[in-house]
Amino acid sequence: MPAFKAFYLLPLTTYRTPLRSDTLWGKLAWAIRLLYGEKELEKLIESYESGGPEAFYISSAFPFGIKEEKNELLHFLPRPMLPPPLTEDRQDDFLSQKMAMRRKKKLAKIAHYGLEQWEYVAGAGELVSTESAAFQAPKQLTTHMTHVTIDRATGSTLSLNNGGQLFHSPEKFMKPDKKAGFDKTGLFFLAQGNTTKVETALRFLRHIGLGGDRTTGKGTFELYKTADFDLKSPATPNAVMTLSLFHPTAEERLDLEKIAGQDERYLNYKLVRRQGRMSPEFMVSSRYQKDIIPYFEEGSTFPISAFKNHLAAGFNPPAMKDLPENPARQYGHALFVPINIK
């Protein structure tokens, strides 16, 4: 049975918002509400707390490339955050240590590994040459769009301090990468659980876009395809890596603190703080900014014994704790894959 369902998106325009798991889930949940009604959305949100059958768990979006001549589709996953090598594994002479550190520094700049290279690093596959296309992930390029501030009262350009009010906003885009041999490039994400409504939601969202500035045509995409997706697993995994942003429960945080001293080589992570805005149609007060929520980033690793239920690790915290009447949630579940850290 396939471990995951993969969804492949080909961007048709620039997009303002990076498609990380919390953003993706929020857009999917919003689409489910519009397509199936508010009761279906409430049932979905409740299923994450009760362990009901409606829940689905997703990763963030990662790059993929298509080589049409060879009929190849190459996947790229986030580089696992690994500890430094053990002392006995290091070379004795200074020059060897210096070159090893330079290689490590070079590899640390790589955000994504090709699937075969990732499986090797995870302890589940054969070695792939570091000079191969395994490291040449399609790039998400950035451009800056210039805007002018409009005076809402007059409908003309706002003038302050004897001048107009220009501002710039970054936008991302992807394009064919002939140097790497990719005829098409895009983003894919993985999902587990009840994914029956995910494809329908994506087919709806492709018409209105994902992320910021949707009303000006940003964030539109083609749903290239969906497919079953398997990852090789190591024979003896000792850790798990998250493919999504991960917000653990209070109990899971305590368990991590207890285990950290015993299995510290398996606990490697970066933290990021996320704060979104409430869509106007869901606001229950004049406040529009959601709470700041800390997450473990994609690629963070944890001891395999730290979690009782790998599929349902983490939880969806309230978007606004001080407004209990607001039912909005931020996605915080981990999508774990087993790895072996040496």
Image (spheres, rainbow, N blue to C red):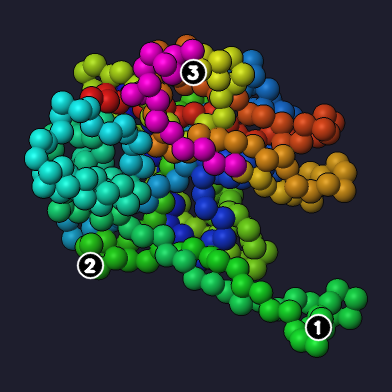
Q: Residue at x 72, y 39 (%)?
A: 291
Three-letter code, disc 1: Asn
Three-letter code, disc 2: Lys
Q: Nearer the viewer, mark 2 or mark 3?
A: 3
Residue found farthest to the right: 153
Placement of the N terminus among the 4 image quadrants: top left
Label 3 crowd bin: few (<14), some (14–19), many (20+), radius 10 Å: many
Label 1 crowd bin: few (<14), some (14–19), many (20+), radius 10 Å: few
Local secondary structure at mark 1 = loop
Q: CA distance from mark 3 to mark 1?
A: 53 Å
Which of the two discs, 3 and 1, labels the residue nearer the N terminus?
Answer: 1
Q: Residue at x 35, y 23 (%)?
A: 266
Three-letter code, disc 3: Leu
Q: Which mark is residue 256?
A: 3
Give the residue number, with chain letter if any, for mark 1.
Answer: 161
Which of the two discs, 2 and 1, labels the residue nearer the N terminus?
Answer: 1
In-image side of 248 versus 81 (left or right): right
